[in-house]
């Protein structure tokens, strides 16, 4: 059985909740506390081509991340994420040798596979370890997924992930994709899992993933109190405790509790995440969770109407959320109700 690694994405995926605006002092303190959890990989935020603000975990230069890591901890790798749909231009990406950043994770889109491959190739050429994050893995047929895995394996990445972007997949479905990836990847490439909790399944999927007993290394993503997009992520404190008890790991949960108590509790009270009926509805209809958040939180619509509206949205229109689109289908629904 390969090694099991735990990646924290609190400062990155958690930023979907508060526009990544944790506050400069909070960012420094959260990094310190997350380092003390003994996780294996710490993801510090997004790299994007937009103005840098010290109070946000969105950066336009890897050196901005390096400035936060004055005392880089041994046996901990530091990561950031880039979206191929809105990438930081490669010419703006510093050579890895000039930064404290170890890993860059790239979200690739199925409809931009060629662009995604070329961008990931550029990341590797800059000297970073690469994690390939194919968004919405369920949109791939088995043959398409295997071809994608084989293609990106040519770049010798650190890991290729199975990503349940919208929290729509069961453990059986995700383990199927994991098996496809495991069989298609050469030795030496880790297999990762990033899930969301719209169906309250992230913890069980992670446990099943760990217990499959892959020969290769695996990586499990999680965040403190599950903070993240839609219904949130796998809870770091839960899966860390499980790994401690079942795998003999030594992750420290006290700093996780401190982070929640000092910073995340207030964010949660003003903008809650986690399982909710609107997010459940988006999951069962394979719909972008932002529709559920808008109808449920901003429009405060009853779940029965959220369900009715989303059923009226054509499947292809459920992929990309815009407020204008959401308002249009809401009007059409009530006009014909």
Image (tube, rainbow, N blue to C red):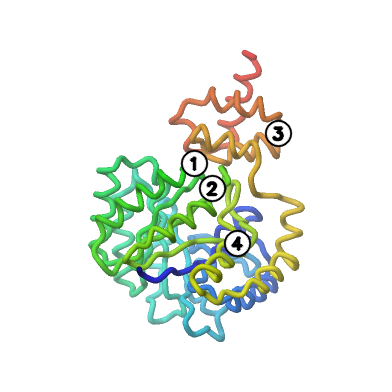
Which mark is on residue 168? 1
Q: Which residue is mark 2?
A: 201
Mark 4: give few (<14), some (14-19) or many (20+) Cα within 10 Å.
some
Mark 3: give few (<14), some (14-19) or many (20+) Cα within 10 Å.
few
**Earlier-in-chain disc, 2 versus 4:** 2
Disc 1 vs disc 2: which is toward the camera? 2
Q: In this orientation, which residue lies closer to the viewer: 220 or 133?
A: 220
Q: Which residue appears at 34% of the width and 45% of the height? A: 110
Circle 2 SS class? loop
Kindly indicate whether the residue at mark 4 contacts the one at mark 3 (C-beta within 8 angstroms).
no
Circle 4 SS class? helix
- Which quadrant holds residue 253? bottom right
Q: In this orientation, which residue lies closer to the viewer: 58 or 107?
A: 107
- How many angstroms separate mark 3 from mark 2 (CA)? 27 Å
Q: Position of residue 87 (x, y in %)?
A: 42, 57
Kindly indicate whether the residue at mark 4 contacts the one at mark 2 (C-beta within 8 angstroms).
no
Q: In this orientation, which residue lies closer to the viewer: 335 or 52?
A: 335
């Amino acid at each position: 059985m390969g090694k099991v690694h735990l990646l924290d994405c609190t400062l990155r995926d958690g930023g979907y909740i508060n526009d990544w605006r944790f506050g400069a002092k909070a960012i420094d303190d959260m990094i310190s506390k997350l380092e003390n959890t003994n996780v294996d990989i710490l993801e510090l935020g997004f790299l994007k081509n937009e103005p840098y603000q010290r109070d946000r975990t969105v950066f336009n230069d890897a050196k901005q991340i390096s400035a936060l890591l004055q005392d880089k901890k041994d046996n901990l790798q530091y990561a950031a994420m880039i979206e191929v749909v809105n990438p930081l231009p490669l010419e703006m990406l510093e050579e890895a040798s000039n930064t404290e950043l170890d890993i860059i994770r790239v979200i690739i889109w199925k409809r931009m596979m060629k662009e995604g491959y070329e961008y990931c190739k550029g990341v590797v050429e800059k000297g970073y370890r690469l994690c390939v994050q194919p968004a919405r893995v369920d949109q791939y047929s088995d043959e398409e997924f295997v071809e994608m895995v084989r293609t990106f394996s040519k770049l010798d990445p650190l890991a290729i992930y199975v990503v349940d972007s919208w929290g729509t997949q069961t453990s059986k479905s995700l383990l199927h994709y994991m098996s496809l990836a495991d069989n298609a990847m050469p030795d030496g490439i880790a297999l990762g899992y990033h899930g969301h909790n719209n169906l309250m399944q992230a913890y069980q999927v992670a446990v099943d993933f760990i217990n499959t007993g892959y020969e290769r290394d695996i990586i499990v993503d999680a965040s403190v109190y599950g903070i993240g997009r839609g219904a949130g992520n796998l809870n770091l404190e839960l899966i860390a405790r499980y790994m401690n008890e079942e795998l003999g790991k030594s992750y420290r949960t006290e700093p996780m509790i401190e982070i929640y108590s000092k910073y995340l509790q207030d964010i949660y009270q003003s903008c809650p995440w986690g399982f909710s009926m609107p997010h459940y509805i988006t999951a069962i209809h394979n719909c972008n969770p932002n529709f559920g958040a808008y109808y449920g939180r901003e429009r405060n619509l009853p779940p029965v109407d959220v369900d009715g509206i989303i059923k009226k949205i054509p499947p292809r229109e459920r992929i990309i959320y815009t407020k204008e689109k959401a308002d249009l289908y809401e009007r059409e629904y009530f006009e014909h109700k």
